[in-house]
Image (cartoon, grey):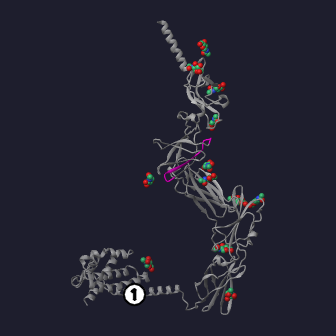
Amino acid sequence: MRMIMAVLVLVVSVSLTEATGCVSTSGLQCYKNSTKRDEDFFCEWDERNPEKTQTHTLYIWDSEKKRFLMYANCGNQSQRKIRLEELGIPNRKTDIWVQTQVGNLTCNSSKISVILACMVKYSKPQIISMKRSAGSLDLTLDKPNDDKRAIYEIRWRERDSKWQTVTFETEDRTQDFYKLHLQINSSYQIQLRRQAKVQSALCNSSLHALWSDWSPMMDVPLEIRSPPVIRWIQNNQSNGTRHIKLSWDAPPAEESVGGVEYNLTFLVWPCKKNKRMQHSTVNQTYNISITYSEARIYINAINKVGSSPQGQIIIPAVKHLNYCESHMPSHVTKANNKTCLEWYKLEDGETRPKTVNSSSTKSFKHIKNDKDVKHFVRHYYFLHIKRKGHYQTVAMCPFYSEQKAPINGPANVNISDLTHESAVVSWLSIPVAEQQGFLQHYVIWISGQGNTKFHKVPANKTSFLIKDLHPETSYTVSIAGRTEAGNGPNSTVNFETNSKEKGLSWQDHTILSVCLFALLSTLICSIAARRLKLLPKVPSPVIDTTEFRCPEEQDLSQMMEEVHEFVLLLRQDLSKPRENVTSEQSTLLQDFGLVVFEEEDEEDEEGGVIDLNSIKSCFYPNPSYRGQTLHLPEPFHMTDSTSKDSDTESTYRNGLFFETKVLECDKTSL
Ligand SMILES: *[C@@H]1O[C@H](CO)[C@@H](O)[C@H](O)[C@H]1NC(C)=O
Ligand SMILES: *[C@@H]1O[C@H](CO)[C@@H](O)[C@H](O)[C@H]1NC(C)=O
Ligand SMILES: *[C@@H]1O[C@H](CO)[C@@H](O)[C@H](O)[C@H]1NC(C)=O
Ligand SMILES: *[C@@H]1O[C@H](CO)[C@@H](O)[C@H](O)[C@H]1NC(C)=O
Ligand SMILES: *[C@@H]1O[C@H](CO)[C@@H](O)[C@H](O)[C@H]1NC(C)=O
Ligand SMILES: *[C@@H]1O[C@H](CO)[C@@H](O)[C@H](O)[C@H]1NC(C)=O
Ligand SMILES: *[C@@H]1O[C@H](CO)[C@@H](O)[C@H](O)[C@H]1NC(C)=O
Ligand SMILES: *[C@@H]1O[C@H](CO)[C@@H](O)[C@H](O)[C@H]1NC(C)=O
Ligand SMILES: *[C@@H]1O[C@H](CO)[C@@H](O)[C@H](O)[C@H]1NC(C)=O
Ligand SMILES: *[C@@H]1O[C@H](CO)[C@@H](O)[C@H](O)[C@H]1NC(C)=O
Ligand SMILES: *[C@@H]1O[C@H](CO)[C@@H](O)[C@H](O)[C@H]1NC(C)=O
Ligand SMILES: *[C@@H]1O[C@H](CO)[C@@H](O)[C@H](O)[C@H]1NC(C)=O
């Protein structure tokens, strides 16, 4: 019994030491990289329990001939390259296993039975390009290294959902290509692997087919639909260089999955060499220095499945100069600097045309006499240099191959501010297209009374004050532009100076009429004042209300309207001392006077409308409404804000109102 127990313990302990000490390997694979005959083989396995001291031995057993084809000590490595020469003939069925040894202990991996010649395992596929459009994804894949047909398996999924799988086969020697149909709106992840199609009678069993490893997981974004929107800021402009900071937006997230790159194309150098510059970046900003000439910049956003439409900006040339003091800096030596001369005709004398001329060999002297440079037409040139990758404009000027006098005189010649001794002549500058040369100045002749005076006016002026004229004299002004080739045609205008005495300008007229109004208003005021003085101070109780027939006998509305208007008028007059009555107020007076009469007629016809304000004013004279005379209704306050309701004023008003009432009522009773 004890013996049995001891044996058991021994067995268990032995098996235990074996279990911990020697762990057999797994995942043994032997294969060649391609279907080519003379390919070497490659065996590899996993180590489940790597120990420093363990060693592996690879056994290849010919199961037909019942002998070892080879065995190889692999040390502590987990792979072994087997050259064809070592192996001999690989076309027979073989058993392969790995023996692992740890100290005294050995253990064997499970055997695989294969025909080595059939064992092909391709490298994992690589996606050369993806192009996505309208729900389909075109995949271009690298060929296996033997250029042979293959079976592919592709799997794809929307993020965090289940894989979908499909297999497809490709042909010999054609590009490995596949069109996968996807939802338009989603981004995906895809992976591929492939398998050789070994065409040998030996290898019909699918056991022999080895899948390659899965390709790395690839993100499939949506195609980028819109071009990048490019912004630019000119940071500074000095010494012929402009520093431009470009920035642009990234595409939306679904289009950016897997990364976006931007291809920038610059057209900043008009000459052939270096004309197109390219840069590619993952950033969304870029700084560039450009010349003073027009620059064009294009940007594509490129993601894993394609390129966006091209975004474009044109950075316009700096404003064209009108004139240059000197041409071509002498310090630029063509031989040692990368130079580019750019020139073009200015359309309408101002605008850069679509196409421009450029040369990296010609100098300004050449182009000035070039047959393409038309006479009498303004052209423009730039001279750019490129130094240490920086672009710089060292000269820019307008030029003519030959100049001529202006084709026309200035347009819209006008005389203004005419007095008896002076006048201002003004005109529109001659358009560049009509100048035919650089306008040096304008010449002005003023002829009258048999004399002609002559003036020069700078080319950037468009008006001139003619002085020292005689009154009541007619003059002729002729004005022409001048270039170095001479004067252009005259534009003429005639005028006559004003007489010294009679000649009144419109300002004089207004002053006069204002004075007249003032006079008139003082007159009216004085009449009113005289009237006031004559009036006796009538205490309110004296007013006989029965005499005041207005409310009872007359149509209310008719009366009220009149009285209201009149009260307004008089009160306004009174509240201001006489001196302050201006012409404006006097016109007001007149107007109100008119209104009173007009309204009388109208109201007679209409009749029915009753205004509360007018009722109040109509009842003024009644002593029981005295309170209301002190607190005038709203409209009065609005028409005269300066007045204050002092006691004396109100008595005055009372007297006045009283009188007006009587007057009005008398009038209507007539
Ligand atoms: C098979 O290809 C892999 C990678 O391409 C290479 O490392 C290996 O050496 C190749 N094996 C053989 C036997 O050519
Ligand atoms: C394999 O053995 C070598 C010496 O033969 C040793 O230097 C190396 O560290 C060992 N590697 C491993 C993974 O045990
Ligand atoms: C190998 O085994 C023998 C007995 O089976 C033992 O005596 C010896 O110590 C072992 N050696 C090692 C290195 O374990
Ligand atoms: C492992 O394989 C070798 C070689 O075939 C053999 O001698 C040995 O007995 C095997 N060991 C075990 C534990 O199967
Ligand atoms: C794609 O999304 C747009 C709005 O985002 C929606 O109008 C359209 O129907 C969607 N199309 C598909 C096929 O899901
Ligand atoms: C421009 O050039 C002058 C001399 O040629 C130099 O002194 C100046 O610093 C330059 N300015 C800039 C902004 O580079
Ligand atoms: C982007 O630019 C690189 C060079 O910078 C070029 O090779 C590539 O073809 C360009 N891609 C596109 C889509 O234009
Ligand atoms: C992107 O910008 C960072 C800093 O803004 C810069 O260091 C990096 O070089 C830029 N990368 C490229 C490709 O221009
Ligand atoms: C190139 O031109 C610059 C002026 O723009 C000048 O300073 C420089 O000396 C020139 N370089 C050579 C090598 O002549
Ligand atoms: C006109 O040109 C002169 C120099 O010719 C210049 O001093 C002046 O400032 C210019 N006037 C205007 C309004 O441009
Ligand atoms: C313009 O008028 C002036 C003065 O009348 C005259 O001397 C000159 O010849 C005229 N010019 C032309 C081109 O007619
Ligand atoms: C009216 O004129 C006098 C002096 O003439 C002045 O004291 C008073 O402030 C003026 N009143 C108004 C309202 O202009």
The answer to which image quadrant residue 531 occupies is bottom left
Residue 387 part of the magenta-drawn span: no
Q: Can residue 581 be seen in this snapshot?
A: no
Q: Which residues are magenta?
A: 133-146
Horizontal side, residue 391 vs residue 209: left or right:
right
Horizontal side, residue 416 vs residue 630: left or right:
right
581 to 381, vertically: above or below: below
Residue furthest front as drawn? 201
Q: Classify mark 1: residues with Cα within 10 Å, few (<14), some (14-19) or many (20+).
A: some
Amino acid type of the residue that numbered disc 1 sits on in the rendered structure: Ile
Q: Determine the quadrant in which ligand 10 lies.
A: bottom right
The residue nearer to you, when weighing 586 against 8, is: 8
The residue nearer to you, when weighing 101 against 371, is: 101
The residue nearer to you, when weighing 640 against 378, is: 378
The answer to which image quadrant residue 199 occupies is top right
The answer to which image quadrant residue 311 occupies is bottom right
Please give the name of the residue rendered at 54% of the width and 42% of the height, measured from the top-left corner: 152
Q: Which residue is mark 1?
A: 524
> Where residue 297 sits: x, y (%)?
61, 59
> Where residue 159 sits: x, y (%)?
48, 44
> Where residue 384 sits: x, y (%)?
71, 62
Q: Can residue 454 be seen in this snapshot?
A: yes
The residue nearer to you, when weighing 662 against 434, is: 434
321 to 35, vertically: above or below: below
Horizontal side, residue 651 vs residue 521: left or right:
left
Horizontal side, residue 169 vs residue 359: left or right:
left
Please give the name of the residue rendered at 54% of the width and 20% of the height, measured from the top-left corner: 20
Residue 139 part of the magenta-drawn span: yes
Assign the C terminus to one quadrant of the image.
Answer: bottom left
Q: Is mark 1 within 8 Å of ligand 12?
A: no
Q: Secondary structure at mark 1?
A: helix
